[in-house]
Amino acid sequence: MPKKKEVTIPRPMEQRIREAARCTWQAIGADTLRGVGEDMTRDHVVETVCDASYMEMYGQDREACDFLRTLSVEQQYKIVSEAFPHKTYGW
């Protein structure tokens, strides 16, 4: 499968994607942390938020989520990780 080309993302869309990621974590974070039973790294949070259509279900911005899915995995990770500034997340 050919690698996706890096896309220039308009600043307002970046902000919408990050907000959708934060909304998603607000919806699934507590249950996820209970299930994991320990603090989670930023990488784990980003992976969880982007997994299993959680952003589409809880992100409250379908257009931003659809745009995110057109990006390469690397670009998706970069933009979503900017929504989570801490090294770890937990109670």
Image (spheres, rainbow, N blue to C red):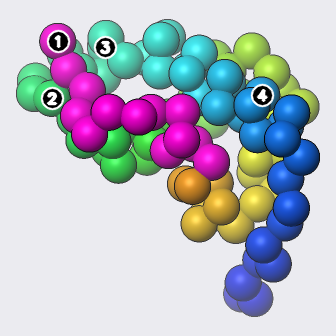
Q: Percent x, y for residue 30?
A: 31, 11
First of labels 2, 4 by sequence position: 4
Which residue does the image show at 70% across and 67% down from the upper left?
72
Q: Which residue lies furthest to the left in this view?
A: 38
Q: Name the residue under label 3.
A: 31
Q: Camera-side residue: 81 or 44?
A: 81
Q: Is residue 79 above or below residue 65?
A: below
The reply to whether the C-beta atoms of the residues labelled 1 and 2 are less than 8 Å apart is yes
Badge 2 element? loop
Type of the residue with mark 4: Arg
Q: Within the magenta stretch, is there residue 56?
A: no
Q: Percent x, y for residue 79?
A: 62, 48
Q: In this view, does 10 lie to the left or right of 81?
A: right
- Check residue 68 in the rendering and tell me which mark sits there, or answer none: none
First of labels 1, 2 by sequence position: 2
Q: Tell me the quadrant of the picture where the N terminus can be found.
A: bottom right
Which residue does the image show at 75% across and 88% down from the upper left?
2
First of labels 3, 4 by sequence position: 4
- Check residue 39 in the rendering and tell me which mark sits there, or answer none: 2
First of labels 2, 3 by sequence position: 3
Q: Mark 4 points at which residue?
A: 16
Q: Camera-side residue: 11 or 61?
A: 11
